[in-house]
Amino acid sequence: MSDPAASDVAATDPGVRVTLIAAVASNGVIGNSAARIGAGAPAIPWRLPGELAEFKAITMGGVLVMGRATYDTIGRPLPGRTTIVVTRDPAWAADGVEVAHSLDAALGLAATMPGRTFVAGGAQLYEQALALASEQILTMVPLDADGDVLYPAYDPGQWVETERERREAYDRVWLRRAGH
Ligand SMILES: NC(=O)c1ccc[n+]([C@@H]2O[C@H](COP(=O)([O-])OP(=O)(O)OC[C@H]3O[C@@H](n4cnc5c(N)ncnc54)[C@H](OP(=O)(O)O)[C@@H]3O)[C@@H](O)[C@H]2O)c1
């Protein structure tokens, strides 16, 4: 997770301020793809009391941009926020959800909406949005978690930790892109 990443270089202004929000284990794991193929594994391999409530409070009133696979693990739009699902499937639709067929289109749509824009996963979306992001809000979970879905590597030299709140089971950390 902390290896310098070639992709982690600020890209052209996406037209909206982009915040990545994720819960990441020490080994970079953010999820488990086995959940998708019905193996009974949890999509996210931990339970953190209070963490979801914090996610809700931080994102309330904003826009959540997420990949179709992440949306499938949630299965419904989250209340009080606009959900934009990114998919290449032209036929995909769900009640109460906006659809975009590229990350650019999703961010363009988010720019027309009130509230902050959060990229809420999963790995494919984080990977593509990292270079566009000016902020990361990370729940850092001190676990070598079981899972095969990883948060993208980012270059710590490009990011400044602006805040850290220590919880019993994790730290919540705010990172701002250096110079932004
Ligand atoms: N720990 C955390 O904070 C956290 C947060 C979120 C998710 N997760 C975990 O992450 C996992 C899912 O991540 P993932 O990487 O497998 O999937 P994902 O990023 O959620 O979604 C991938 C899907 O998004 C669509 N997509 C991606 N890039 C696109 C683009 N440029 N244009 C159009 N559509 C695009 C495609 O959908 P179509 O196939 O429909 O075309 C693709 O299959 C799950 O295990 C989930 O639980 C963890």
Image (tube, helix red, strand yellow):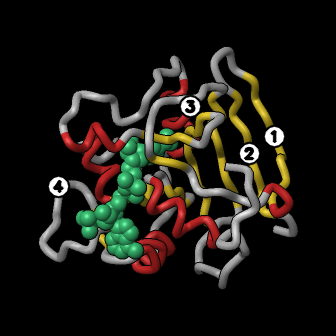
Task: Say whether marks 2 and 1 touch (CB < 8 Å).
Answer: yes
Q: Residue at x 76, y 61 (%)?
A: 4
Amino acid type, residue under disc 4 in the picture: Asp
Numbered disc 1: secondary structure = strand
Q: Which mark is residue 174?
A: 2
Residue 127 at x, y = what percent?
Answer: 54, 63
Most foreground residue, 107 or 101: 101
Most foreground residue, 159 or 100: 159
Q: Which residue is mark 1?
A: 163
Q: Quadrant of ligand 1?
A: bottom left
Task: From the image, state whether disc 1 or disc 4 is nearer to you.
Answer: 1
Instruction: State the CA–CA distance, disc 1 to disc 4.
Output: 36 Å
Which mark sits nearer the N-terminus, 1 or 4?
A: 4
User: On screen, 152 above or below 139?
Assistant: below
Residue 84 at x, y = what percent?
Answer: 35, 62
The answer to whether one can see residue 85 in this image is no
Numbered disc 4: secondary structure = loop
Q: Which mark is residue 95?
A: 4
Instruction: State the CA–CA distance, disc 2 to disc 1.
Output: 5 Å
Q: Which residue is mark 3?
A: 54
Left or right placement of residue 89 versus residue 158 in this view: left
